Image: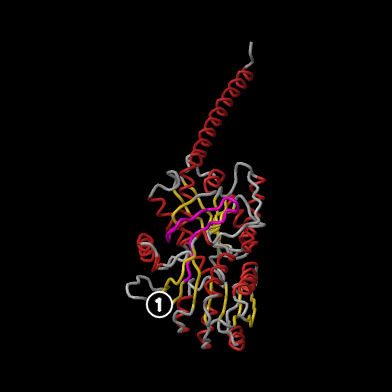
Amino acid sequence: MVAANEIGQFRWGRQWEDVMKARMVGLAVGASLFVVPALADDTVKIGYIDPLSGGGASIGEVGLKTFQYLADELNAEGGLNGKKIEIVPLDNKTNPQESLIQAQKAADQGIRIITQGNGSSVAAALTDWVTKYNDRNPGKEIIYLNYAAVDPVLTNDKCSYWHFRWDANSDIKMAALTTFMKDRPNIKKVYLINQDYSFGQSVRKQARAMLGEKRPDIEIVGDEVHPLLKVTDFSPYVAKIKASGADTVITGNWGQDIALLLKAAADAGLQTDWYTYYAGGAGGPTAIKQTGLSHRVFEITEGVPNSAPESAQKWEADFRAKEGVSLFYPRAVNEMRMLAKASALAKSDDPKAIADKLEGMTVTAFDGGEATMRKDDHQFFQDIYISSFGPLDPGAKFDEEGTGWGWKTLGIVKAKDTLLPTTCKMERP
């Protein structure tokens, strides 16, 4: 016979097993419910790593608006292979170390596409980080899409399979600027003023070299560098320019550094020509108007709104109406459209598959002309334009920042004429 307490223990044991089985089934169901959304995720997140605070915030915010607008546009057309694109803003304060923190946050969120443009020191740090991260995490690679950081080293000695650049590098831009300048006999004395980091150093070096080759008669009467996005009053620098007797200034300054420099020039009544990379950025047009230097401030860009193709002008009119800002970054349009094309060709949003399709891709650029992502170094080549800023010509659609002034095309350098050799030795996975 079995004792009563043994029967009780047996029944309790069976009940305990039943309870545990029920709990295990419940946990399994709960776990499956938890996992399903991740497996059915229909969103591709792009980490936007740029300044949203500090000295670079004004242009970082414009860039964010631009990418969000482009994401909405692509989503209306089906996104990336049917997946919705989401732009995730990550504030790097234009700081390389902070950028790496934000890149790691992106990786921790499962973001496998990042984009950045403001600051070549940031771009160099991100390129190194992405390359090392991908080496350590096969199957979870991240691709880095660079829309504006233009230090030539990024597509030369520091090139990476995982980095693609849509802006012309600073050597290409300086070659175009100095070719234009060599035929302007009014240029006698040039003052160089640039931001004190890799990009600014590249601008000053190449300006000296290329002017020396094309116009050896020009005298360099000043060569100044200053801290990046930290100067709030440029009047001491402008006083030096004025005292030097310069008739021309060359600067690669961007963000608040170009706007405040031009403002100080206006306040001092400095009468010089300006050859710039980024005078059209936030605050720049207003400062130029204050100088009164009609068509004496020049800029080199990948497009000019008032001479763009009709389709680009319509796109820009819609963009300005919705966002309240100009399209500073036609290259961002090229970047996002090519990303969508690469994803469609690959039938995948996997970074390795996208990179493979981007290499060597040829498209019609936003502002017209055939453009190519060179396979050798992942440098984008497109037509680039030299323009000046002044009162609008009859029929021109776009002024800037409500000034009544706008950009006018003076010259075009065709993509084939911007090709420079590369020292890149691409290591492909």
Q: Secondary structure at mark 1?
A: strand
Say if residue 254 shows up in the picture: no
Q: Position of residue 255 (x, y in %)?
A: 53, 71
Q: Determine whether, in the image, residue 323 is placed left or right of residue 225.
A: left
29 in relation to 117, above or below: above
* Quarter assignment of residue 419: bottom right
Residue drawn at x 43%, y 67% is 304
The image quarter in which residue 420 lies: bottom right
Q: Nearer the viewer, residue 249 or 30?
A: 249
The N terminus sits in image quarter? top right
Residue 344 in picture, x, y percent from top left: 46, 44
* Vertical arrangement, residue 9 with respect to residue 177, above or below: above
| Magenta span contains residue 368 | yes
* Range of magenta residues: 365-386
Q: Residue at x 55, y 28 (%)?
A: 19
Q: Residues within 10 Å of mark 1 (few under 14, many from 20)?
A: many
Is 82 contained in the magenta span? no
Which sits in the foreground, 274 or 321?
274
Label 1 sits on what residue type?
Trp
Q: Return the x and y of residue 249 as percentages of the image width and height.
A: 56, 79
Q: Residue at x 57, y 29 (%)?
A: 20
User: In this image, 17 relative to 314: left or right?
Assistant: right
Image quadrant in which the C terminus is located: top right
The answer to whether 390 appears left or right of 240 in the picture is left
Quickly name the residue at label 1.
405
Considering every residue shown, the one lying at the far top of the view is 1
Image location (x, y in percent) of residue 127: 63, 55
The quadrant in which residue 92 appears is bottom right
- State whether residue 136 appears in this view: yes
Q: Residue at x 51, y 35 (%)?
A: 32
Residue placed furthest toward the left: 395
